[in-house]
Image (cartoon, rainbow, N blue to C red):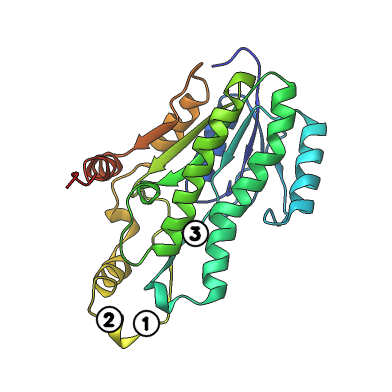
């Protein structure tokens, strides 16, 4: 545990993987400002503040972060919010695509950018970007989701090199299947006949029949591991959590084409 309480800013902090992370931080004595996500309310705490703003809008991001920083300077940012639309690329409406990119890429970029200046002035802090195996490995039925995650990973890798000399450390946490309620909350495109029995239709039906309890990852253990990452003096750029994630990332690494 650190010698003094820290202030953590967590998006998607009331559901999925955000809720156990917020609880972990509070249990360790930290202060938390969270952005709602999901329907599960956390117990009231004098060290917990809830912000309700649209974090895809630059003006609202600036207002939230200014208010948060004035209350107590932020030491750790966790960009955790997100959801997924499952279906073929041609089935996705412009609105569904836009929603995915705004939630998975635009919002974390705006939040990260807004915190860089204050963190630089304080001599460095931590930013954790929640990604998935889809940040490295694309699969059918998840094109927009994986585009958002892969974009976030590329952005994070670039920014991490820009700010390392300021003592700001960024880490991408690549997650696999976990019992967070994410799968039951998936949204689906309107299915079309040509895509019903192709490589999109099969994973779609598999997900629709999957129960949350079927997934291997324990949210509390994942939250504890993510929290520990924020305490490391020199954290790695990428952190793969879960055996399914590690296997997927390794397959992607070994998939480099041989030269002709």
At label 2, counting other C-alpha atoms closer than 10 Å, the crowd grade (few under 14, some 14-19, many 20 or more) is: some
Give the distance between the C-alpha atoms of the residues marked 1 and 2, in whole angstroms.
Answer: 7 Å
Q: Name the residue beneath numbered marker 3.
A: 83
Give residue 187's position: percent from left, percent from top. Answer: 45, 70
* Of residues 206 and 195, the one drawn nearer to the viewer in this rendering: 195
At label 3, counting other C-alpha atoms closer than 10 Å, the crowd grade (few under 14, some 14-19, many 20 or more) is: some
Residue 34 seen in the figure: no
Dots 3, 2 in contact, CB < 8 A: no
| Helix, strand or loop status at disc 1 | loop
Name the side, left or right, on which 63 lies relative to 38: right
Name the side, left or right, on which 11 lies relative to 186: right
At 45% from the left and 45% from the top, the residue drawn is 131
Q: Name the residue beneath numbered marker 2.
A: 196
Relative vertical location of residue 81 with respect to residue 229 in this rendering, above or below: below
Give the distance between the C-alpha atoms of the residues marked 1 and 3, in whole angstroms.
Answer: 19 Å
Dots 1, 2 in contact, CB < 8 A: yes
Lower position in the chain sequence, tag 1 or tag 3: 3
Relative vertical location of residue 201 with respect to residue 237 in this rendering, above or below: below
Give residue 143's position: percent from left, percent from top. Answer: 40, 63
The answer to which image quadrant residue 102 occupies is bottom right
Q: Residue 191's mark?
A: 1
| Helix, strand or loop status at disc 2 | loop
At label 1, counting other C-alpha atoms closer than 10 Å, the crowd grade (few under 14, some 14-19, many 20 or more) is: some
Relative vertical location of residue 124 with respect to residue 55 in this rendering, above or below: above
| Helix, strand or loop status at disc 3 | loop
Lower position in the chain sequence, tag 1 or tag 2: 1
């Amino acid at each position: 545990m650190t010698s003094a309480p820290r202030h953590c800013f967590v998006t998607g902090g009331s559901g999925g993987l955000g809720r156990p992370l917020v609880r972990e931080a509070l249990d360790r004595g930290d202060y938390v400002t969270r952005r709602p996500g999901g329907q599960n309310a956390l117990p009231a705490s004098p060290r917990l503040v809830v912000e309700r703003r649209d974090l895809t809008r630059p003006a609202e991001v600036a207002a939230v972060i200014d208010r948060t920083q004035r209350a107590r300077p932020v030491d750790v940012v966790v960009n955790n919010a997100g959801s997924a639309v499952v279906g073929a690329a041609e089935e996705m409406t412009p609105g569904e695509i836009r929603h995915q990119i705004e939630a998975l890429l635009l919002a974390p970029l705006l939040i990260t950018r807004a915190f860089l200046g204050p963190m630089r002035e304080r001599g460095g802090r931590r930013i954790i970007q929640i990604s998935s195996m889809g940040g490295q490995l694309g699969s059918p039925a998840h094109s927009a989701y994986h585009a958002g995650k892969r974009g976030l990973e590329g952005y994070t890798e670039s920014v991490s090199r820009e700010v390392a000399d300021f003592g700001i450390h960024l880490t991408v946490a690549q997650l696999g299947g976990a019992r967070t309620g994410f799968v039951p909350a998936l949204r689906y495109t309107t299915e079309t006949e040509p895509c019903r029995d192709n490589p999109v239709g099969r994973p779609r039906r598999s997900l629709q029949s999957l129960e949350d309890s079927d997934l291997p990852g324990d949210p509390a253990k994942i939250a504890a591991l993510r929290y520990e990452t924020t305490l490391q003096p020199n954290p790695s750029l990428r952190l793969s959590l879960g055996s399914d994630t590690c296997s997927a990332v390794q397959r992607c690494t070994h998939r480099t084409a041989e030269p002709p």
